[in-house]
Image (spheres, rainbow, N blue to C red):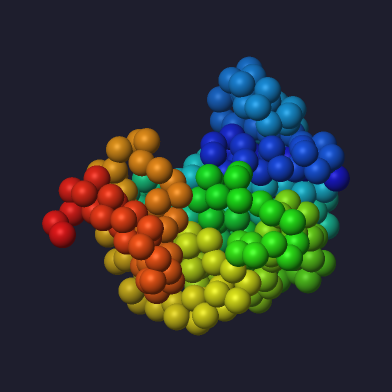
């Protein structure tokens, strides 16, 4: 496929790496122009292009930018994108980074807001996995502890394309229904970033509490802001799994939690 990626951060770059490896023709763009993406292109194999070129005539488009940046995308960005081409939204709302978005604070689902701003339906995927896991934990089908990723959206064919892509990259894909259900794996919920298996994921989704998620999200963001930039991402996943009620019998996970608490200056 011809695939465009808007956003060359950790998630966008990790997806570009996988998709190029699978033989897709990948274009990648950011707000600063293709001349700033030389290193990203070298590492991922993706072609650096402008925003309009990334979205023009591709078979699939990935939006992997902070939510605060979505309204500033060019208004005619999607004018040359076929209606049949899925748009994957990987975004998450963090007020500490994005500022306050009134509609979301009032209860609107994050990706429904993104869809409204873009003026096109989106498929929610790749938002509840840390970039390190996305880049390094892809494994063949049937491998023990293979990570499962939820997918939400209205169009069955578009979801099928996205799910097939997830499986090809090296993860299990789970259809979680319409976009309205995607709040169950937004920040602050049990399914957010614990690298669950296909057996664990449904239970975590069922335990999501919509009224408590924003508070959990904001508390986690405050702690994360105190962590050193080199804090091991795999220990973050272990802490996320403990927080989701997983791995309580694994000593390594408790050591990760201790490291996390000490590094984040949180009273024990």
Residue 263, x across and y down, in percent: 24, 45
- Count of picture labels: 0
Residue pictured at 39% horizontal, 47% vertical = 98
- Tell me if residue 142 comes above or below residue 181 in the rendering: above
Residue 252, horizontal then vertical, whole percent: 38, 58
Which residue is painted at 59% across and 34% down in the image?
Answer: 8
Q: Which of 205 and 60 lies nearest the eye of the viewer? A: 205
Figure check: 258 above or below 109: above
Q: Residue at x 83, y 57 (%)?
A: 84
Q: Is residue 8 above or below residue 183?
A: above
Q: In this view, does 199 lie to the left or right of 227?
A: right
Q: In which quarter of the image is the C terminus?
A: bottom left
Residue 174's image quarter?
bottom right
121 over 224 or under it: above or below: below
Residue at 73% x, 65% y is: 142
Closer to us: 146 or 87: 146
Rendered location of residue 91, percent (x, y): 53, 53
């Amino acid at each position: 496929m011809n695939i465009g990626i808007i956003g060359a951060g950790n998630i966008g770059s990790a997806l570009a790496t996988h998709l190029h490896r699978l033989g897709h023709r990948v274009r990648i763009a950011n707000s600063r122009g293709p001349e700033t993406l030389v290193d990203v292109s070298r590492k991922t194999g993706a072609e650096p292009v402008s925003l309009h070129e990334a979205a023009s005539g591709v078979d699939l488009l990935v939006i992997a930018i902070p939510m605060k940046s979505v309204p500033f995308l060019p208004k005619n960005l999607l004018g040359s994108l076929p209606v049949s081409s899925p748009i994957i939204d990987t975004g998450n709302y963090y007020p500490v980074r994005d500022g306050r978005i009134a509609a979301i604070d009032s209860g609107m689902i994050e990706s429904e807001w993104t869809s409204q701003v873009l003026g096109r339906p989106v498929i929610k995927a790749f938002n509840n996995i840390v970039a390190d896991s996305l880049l390094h934990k892809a494994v063949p089908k049937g491998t023990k502890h293979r990570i499962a990723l939820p997918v939400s959206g209205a169009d069955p064919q578009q979801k099928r394309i996205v799910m097939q892509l997830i499986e090809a990259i090296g993860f299990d894909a789970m259809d979680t229904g319409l976009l309205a259900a995607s709040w169950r794996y937004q920040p602050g919920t049990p399914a957010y970033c614990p690298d669950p298996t296909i057996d664990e994921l449904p239970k975590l989704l069922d335990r999501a509490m919509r009224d408590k998620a924003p508070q959990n999200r904001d508390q986690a963001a405050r702690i994360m802001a105190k962590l050193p930039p080199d804090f091991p991402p795999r220990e973050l996943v272990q802490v996320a799994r403990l927080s989701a009620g997983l791995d309580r019998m694994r000593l390594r996970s408790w050591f990760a939690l201790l490291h996390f608490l000490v590094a984040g200056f949180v009273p024990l």
